[in-house]
Amino acid sequence: MTGFTSTPKENKKCSLKTLLVFGLRLMGRGFSARMKLLCTLNWPYVCKKTFRTHELKLLEAVKYSCEENMKAASKEVQNLKKNTTCGVSVDGTWQRRGHMSLNGCVSVISIDTGKILDLEVMTQYCKMCEMNIKCDRECSNYKGSSGNMESVGAYRIFERSVMKRELQYTEYYGDGDSKVFFKVKDIYGEDTVTKLEFIGHVQKRVGSRLRKLKKKIKGLGGKGKLTDKFIGKLQNYYGIAIRINVGCIVKMQSAVIAAFFHCCSSHRNLMHGHCPDGKDSWCRYKRDLSDKKQYLEKSPGLNNSVMKVIKATYLQLRVKNLLKNACIV
């Protein structure tokens, strides 16, 4: 490797070495991977102690940068909302799949800007403590099941939001799992946090409930009956019904009913009476009717016996409390 020149030194250390450590850690690799790589390239490599020194310095720099970015994101939300309340989405992730992970991370993301406002990293294990090595750094900060990490992490973030970010996360956007919400709903006082749901999550309930019903009742599935294709169609139209009527519960409920009969309609039994009129209607039958065109129904629809069975299950998803908490994000 004659003629090779190193990068400029910073504090008596080559920046290339630090960047190499940073790149390896971004890929989830460590000292062993660096040693193999540099040996393959016939380059000298540093000892494990020096590698660890680079890691710790990078960790401090990343922590500082992360905190500054989250502070700036919280200020942006305050300037945008003109107050100290905002809506957030809470999400947890784990190092390993399943409920056996020793490490996890919970983040809170602003709905208005899409930027992370705060995060909590949790671990149940510290190798240094296990080896009885004295250290002044933070060790394991969580005890319990891996599945409960998200709830505990969210509580910690909400608890310090006013002091650390000067914000109150009064709108909680989440999925169907209510464990996290019940943990934080009274954090600023009784029922001060409202749970709102993504339309996509509400929409998926149609499919999951109808599939369970099909498994439960023999003879409900099959050709000309409740197929997976029909369930997918009904689920999509349910989502459309909510999205185009956000903010008006009465219109939402009417549109959900219209979507059901629209999907069940066939050329032998047209059921588009509940569908919206006009050229801009999502119903093709009503659009063609407005343009004075002849409409040809191609969908096989559902027979009355199957409709009666699934109707009650479907209409449970038009209850007021469920629809009023659905919102577009």
Image (cartoon, grey):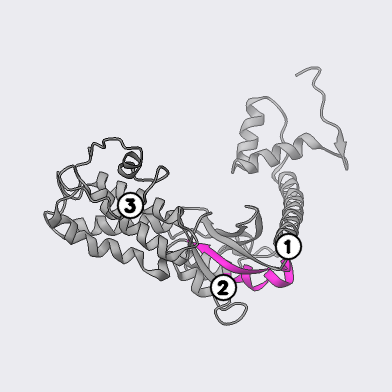
The magenta stretch is 155-174
Q: Which residue is mark 1?
A: 78
Examine the rendering and report whether any part of residue 317 can be seen. Answer: yes
| Residue pictured at 23% horizontal, 61% vertical | 311
The reply, left or right, for residue 299 in relation to residue 77 is: left
Q: Quadrant of the N terminus?
A: top right
The residue at the far bottom in this view is 190
Residue 139: quarter of image:
bottom right
Numbered disc 3: secondary structure: loop
Any mark on residue 125, and which? none
What amino acid does circle 1 point to? Gln
The mark that comes first in sequence, 1 or 2, is: 1
**Image location of residue 10, percent across then percent down:** 87, 40
Residue 161 at x, y = what percent?
68, 69
Q: Quadrant of residue 202?
A: bottom left
Residue contact between numbered discs 1 and 2, judged by CB atoms under 8 Å: no
Q: CA distance from mark 1 to mark 3?
A: 42 Å
- Mark 1 residue element: helix
From the top left corner, tell me how far across and down residue 323 is, in percent: 42, 64
Which residue is label 3 attached to?
A: 275
Residue identified by numbered label 2: 193
Q: Is residue 151 left or right of residue 58?
A: left
**Amino acid under label 2?**
Val
The amino acid beneath tag 3 is: Cys
Whether residue 207 is visible here, answered yes or no, is no
Seen in the picture, residue 186 relative to 314 is either above or below; the reply is below
Structural crowding at the residue carrying mark 1, measured as other residues with C-alpha within 10 Å and reported as few (<14), some (14–19) or many (≥20): some
